[in-house]
Image (cartoon, helix red, strand yellow):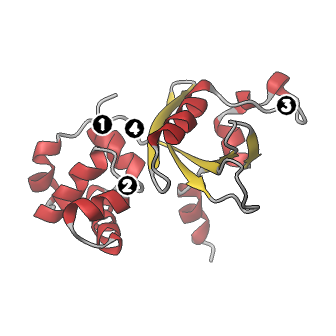
Amino acid sequence: MENSAPISNKASAPGVLIIDGNNTLLHTNSEALSIIPTMKKCGEPDGELYLPEEIVSLCDQLKGSGKPGGTVHGRLSVCRDPYGMKAFFIHNPSGGDEPRSIMVLMEPLVEKRTLKLETAKDEFGLSRREFEVLQCICAGLSNREIAKKMFICEYTVKDHIKKIMNQLKLRSRNEIMAAFLSP
């Protein structure tokens, strides 16, 4: 068990924000507060929390998308460190007509390295289908949208994504997008 500490230190938990339909912050975890320390007004431990403009914009984009099960992706820069963001609806546990809540996940993006999508298939030994999934990820499609477009099930999409991440030595879909998309 002594060797497990370095492994667990490599992966960090994503920052999580829960936001209501009126862009009011309902919940945040400690990782989110460490990513965006300026969310606390005046740096007070019990100070009022506010949402940065990029997060509000991402939530508004999701609400305007008209996709009840959809997700939107965005980018947040804090002190020049890039973070990938993913926003999606979560169900209102109380039911009723109140706006649904939105969950925003934030995680650091890998160091900037622009890879050429055109050469990725040969360079990383991707199959034709893995390459198609890679293109869909870079286009910002969700697993559900990729499955529908490629006429395969979501589990197959997830398997392809796992293989792509292993072959590219990346840990998340945000890292994939960061590697292939120029800022």
Of the image marks 3 and 4, the number of the one nearer the N terminus? 3
Q: Amino acid at mark 1?
A: Arg
Q: Are marks 3 and 2 in contact (CB under 8 Å)?
A: no
Q: Which residue is mark 1?
A: 113
Mark 3 vs mark 1: which is more N-terminal? Answer: 3
> What is the C-alpha distance between the residues marked 3 and 1?
37 Å
Q: Which residue is mark 4?
A: 111
Between disc 2 and disc 1, the foreground one is: 2
Q: Tell me the quarter of the picture where residue 159 sits.
A: bottom left
Assess whether mark 4 and mark 1 are in contact (beta carbons under 8 angstroms): yes
The mark lying in front, picked from 3 and 4, is 3
Q: Nearer the viewer, mark 3 or mark 1?
A: 3
Mark 3 vs mark 2, foreground winner is 2
Q: Earlier in the sequence, mark 2 or mark 1?
A: 1
How crowded pointer 2 is (Cα within 10 Å; few <14, some 14-19, many 20+) is rated as: some
Q: Is residue 176 left or right of residue 19?
A: left
Quadrant where the image shows the N terminus: bottom right
Residue 12: percent from the left, percent from the top? 58, 54
Provide residue 98's location: percent of width, then percent of height: 72, 49
Q: Which residue is mark 3?
A: 48
Question: Splitting the image into 4 quarters, where does residue 39 fall?
Answer: top right
Judge whether 68 appears above or below 84 on screen. Answer: below
Classed neighbour count for the residue bearing mark 3: other residues with Cα under 10 Å, few (<14), some (14–19), many (≥20): few
> What's the residue type where badge 2 is placed?
Ser
Q: Residue at x 69, y 58 (%)?
A: 92
* Residue 101: assigned label: none
SS of the residue under disc 4: loop
Residue where numbered disc 2 is placed:
142
